Amino acid sequence: MTSIPWWASEGLWRKVAIWATGLMFVVLIFLTFDSMSDIIAGNGPRVPDYSVINKRISYKFDEKRNFQVPVIGEEAPLFGKKLSDEEAAALVSHGKKVVQGRNCMNCHTLLGNGAYFAPDLTKAWLDPGWGNEQAREALMLAFLQDPTNNARTFGTGRRMPNLKITEEEAKAVIAFLKWMSSIDTNGFPYMFKPLPQGGKS
Amino acid sequence: MSAAVGVFDSSNLNGGQRLAIKYFTVAMVLFGAQILFGLLAGIQYLNPDFLYGILDFNVNRMVHINAMVIWMLFGFIGASYWLLEDETGVPVVGLWLGNLAFWVFTGAVTVVVLVYLFVQWGPGNDMTRWFINEGREYIEAPRWADIGIVACVLVFFYNVAATVMKGRVTGITGVLVLDLVALAGLYLAGMFYTPNISIDQYWWWWVIHLWVEATWEVLVGCLMAYGLMTVLGTPRRIVQTWLYIEVALMFGTGILGLGHHYFWIGTPEYWLTVGGFFSSLEPIPLVAMVVHAIYDAGTHHTKSANHPTLAWLITHAFGNFLGAGVWGFMHTLPQINLYTHGTQWTASHGHLAFFGAYATMNIAFFYLAVQKARGNVWMGAGLAGNGWKWKWSLALLSTGVMGMTVALLISGYEQSFVERAMDGSTWQGYFDAQSHPWFKQGMYRRQIFGWMTAVGYVLLVWDLLTIGAHETRKAVFPASVEKGSGGAVTEPAPAA
């Protein structure tokens, strides 16, 4: 048996493996607690409360961070009806369940995660493709309920299938999308050009 | 009594290995499903009207990636049962329960896929999440199936842990048991509902990343160690030292490398630094794996007891390094990922990484399995037809996947520039990028290489069913005192 140098011994590397794994896991747990307190809706500045759907959401370039950040502005209730905190939370949650139940994520991305067959939905509420603030809600409602006949293919022929989304479900999805557009995503997607909106932000 | 050499007979196998063959069979079927639905989804990029309203892209893509995840898992579970009795020296404890779990697992997967294909979606309520589709990429399986999967994985874990405790504990089985605790536990992080998409994706990545970039990597590290010991006769001391080095580096970088998924989902800005730093170190253990595999093969002059297995182990070492390491590193820094996140870059990386790191290792074990099932038949040099089937299927599968990877990367580059950098990521920008000739070229090329992959798969199935069938020579396994799996008692001759 030839002698094995200490740095190549099985015992040493077993110890290193155990300690490296343990240490990194402890650090991850610590960071997870910290991140959770930051991203519970309404708990910190990064992920607003669901009642944000009662407000106008716009974008502003932040000189210090060097990218755009969401700005929550004046009252601008979704579908013209101001909701209580509980009603807003219930509507956004319903929207999320529709998004999951219709398997949106296997064509679209949300926060950049999902499939790449259709556009990212992170800032769909603010997309300039809706034209203007006044037309947006009606266009989104019509599109979601009959995407085949209201196709927005931008010349590609790629149409969203008709998933029989009801009016009630469509409104919930729009509430979810509006809330999602208010999340501070560290500037993703970069240099996004939101649709023009009136009012002070 | 063993059957004649060359005849496929389950009496050649121990109990765990007979169960492994069942898992491997289902894994191969699902591998075929993965390729089939990938081809369908690929065609829809070229002709969006193809199967529109019948089998839409989201269904095809979901089956494509779910079949992939499940065939990888079935392969890993099978491979673990395969080596269990060899490593511990005792029969699998509670094997009947393991067999039952196999049938339950396979039945559940079948039902889930049929519901995906024929029900497809449901209303936005809890019933849909429990019984049709959870709508979260990779873990779409409805909640009832999640619970079934956890139950089956627990049975599998019980088989492995109880057998290891009863028999000999080795470095390989020790790491395997601890890794399976993490693998099973992490799945629970994906089993809850929240309306908050940031919290949803935070924990979703615990399952996806910590499986794929941590616990799965360690699991294939165990399989690599066993594979090299078996086909080359590399001493246990060497493969186990390498295994510990890989675990140290893999978990040391990969656990906090999780942070590269927390750049843009609403989580704090410190993740840009933490995730960028640790994930850029993630390729290091993969380099170690290449060095280890190639060095060992060279020491033994690539004389092995099973050429196809050794070839797939080497393909694994390079594929893992290139697909997971290089392709991952290319877009892991936040300064680059800001433009590439959510584009075809990710698809490019995904194709090469999953194939290179995991498909290859599973296929290596499929060849070990058919060899032993045919009575340790000869699988070295001078096979019938010079082994053209395994060589061509390896070449076609590898070239096919590499071709898809490069084609998707070209489309991804174009998409990052046009949609992200120039057009500010609007829907108009997205579709402008999708209409660009360079993007479309990439999609055509991907489809062609997809067909090549499919041909490689067909050849692989054919070869696995026939290799060694008319062979009468018995394999000569390199002896290793330390392995303790056969009657061999001598060290392999030292390399000149």
Image (cartoon, coloured by chain):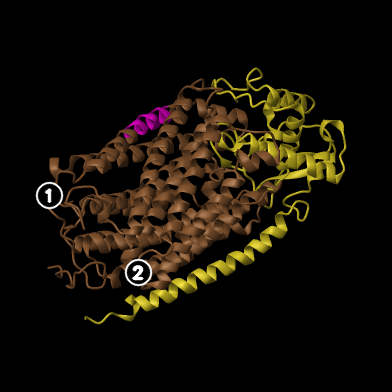
Chain colours: A yellow, B brown
Task: Give the answer, above or below, for where B15 lies relative to B458.
Answer: below
Q: Residue B385 in the image: x percent, y percent?
A: 13, 40
Residue at mark 2: B88
At label 2, the amino acid type is Thr
Q: Is residue A91 left or right of residue A25?
A: right
Q: Residue at x 65, y 37 (%)?
A: A101
Q: Residue at x 36, y 72 (%)?
A: B170
- Badge 2 local density, few (<14 within 10 Å), some, or many (20+)? many
What secondary structure is the stretch in magenta mostly built from? helix
What residue range appears in magenta?
B441-452
Residue at mark 1: B472
Task: Give the answer, above or below, for where B16 lies relative to B398.
Answer: below
What whole-number distance in Å separates the C-alpha atoms at marks 2 and 1? 30 Å
Q: Is residue B446 magenta?
A: yes
Looking at the rendered structure, which numbered label has been put on residue B404? none
- Badge 1 local density, few (<14 within 10 Å), some, or many (20+)? some
Q: Name the element at disc 2.
A: helix
Q: Earlier in the sequence, mark 2 or mark 1?
A: 2
Q: Is residue B248 left or right of residue B381?
A: right
Q: Quadrant of the N terminus of chain B?
A: bottom left
Q: Residue at x 30, y 80 (%)?
A: A5
Q: Name the element at disc 1.
A: loop
